[in-house]
Amino acid sequence: MSEGTLLDVVYCEGWDPAARALIGRFSPGIARERDAAGEQYAVALVRPDSGVPLVLVEVAWKHHFARSAHFDERSRRRGLFEFRVLEDGSLFLVKVEQWTYHFDDQEEFDEQNAGRVELSFGPDGDGWMHKAPRGYGGGSSSGRVRKALSELRMPKPAFGDWEPFTNSKELTLRTPDAPVTDPPVPVEERPWRPSVPLRPFGIDEMFTAGTRFSLSGGHGVVETGLRDAGKLRMTSGRLVAADPAFLDSDAAHFTVTVPPGEYRVVVSVIRFVDEPSHERVVAAKLVVADVPVTTWEAALWPGQNALFLGDGEFYGYGVDSGTGCFTDADALPEEMDDELLEKFEEVDPHIDVTPDGADGNIIAFTTGWGDGSYPTWIGRAADGTPVCFVTDMLILNRARILTA
């Protein structure tokens, strides 16, 4: 962008890549109201002579989200910069995607002939880079990268202060006195949505016996049943959830703790209606208090921050033995010997094991379809107190609730 470039500020629902046009244009007043409420909107910085955007900023503060798209002269997005609003109110650059186009009539995001570079960064500045040169079929490379935090952080701009998203100070931005507006766009037809990490679904229903779900992909109708897996003795209140084959004294516990005590573990099992003998564990719950859950959040290990998760992503523990478990950090064995491992081969669908010399126990359970990675959610009461931990096997995450 050359010095003195004049751009009009246009508030809208977003960019339609098929039509290569802005849609749902509305007044600055509406945009300001959405900004204050944390609702999503977009702002385009447009050349007044051509109506072509140079930068499009998508904002959804309620989701701690902002993203800027930079366009080339043919209205193709050549760069995406994704940000999160951190706990201290600053913006953090979590992801960059850049494309190189080689032909004037080349399609946007052409996987066959465009070059692509993707970078992602964690809270400490460590990141990962993936390069896919022209023609994604070969020659790709990946590696670690690191940026100084000062290069990744910036103050969250106030409404109307769009220059920080442009990577240029040589601009003049103006808001037209009589902006063009369009008919309202229905929410379901908005052209974009913020990146949102995986969220729990149907937890209350899956722990209500007799609830029926229709599985995604036409995999049948199932009905839930509950199994009492015993009481977990927690001497420290520091919960560990993991594949029991990987338990040792170095296993990490969640950052949210509970008072020491004994807590009931309940396993939710689905039975296929058309095949009653076919059962699977879909979730395991550590019940801290029999109090209704009003909010859910991801259970995290030290150093993790859910704000850095991408769309549909989650933190979970890996399972290679088809089994997960709950235990207290004080009950972790120094190492998993063969005798202890053999006990976990008998899980069907749950088992209660006390390691030699431990005051605490390990309650293990089978994990849905078997191996994979599974998140644990924390349910909190209205006053913010944690009342349960649920390991979700994700079988019902995309299912449809039929009865509850």
Image (tube, grey):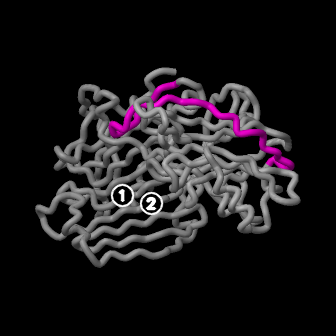
Q: At 42% across and 38% down in the image, what residue appears? A: 398
Q: Residue furthest top?
A: 403
Q: At 54% across and 49% down in the image, what residue appears? A: 85
Q: Is residue 274 above or below residue 327?
A: above
Q: Which mark is residue 382?
A: none
Q: Is residue 214 above or below residue 169?
A: above
165 vs 207, left or right, is left
Q: Secondary structure at mark 2?
A: strand
Query: Percent from the top left, x then y, of residue 341?
Result: 69, 62
**Which residue in the protein does label 2 denote?**
95
Q: CA distance from mark 2 to mark 1?
A: 8 Å
The image quarter in which residue 138 lies: bottom left
Mark 1: which amino acid?
Leu
Q: Is residue 289 visible?
A: yes
**Which residue in the protein does label 1 denote?**
80
Q: Residue furthest left?
A: 105
Closer-to-camera residue (201/46): 201
What residue span does the magenta drawing correspond to? 211-237
Q: Residue furthest front?
A: 277
| Quarter of the image that includes the N terminus | bottom left
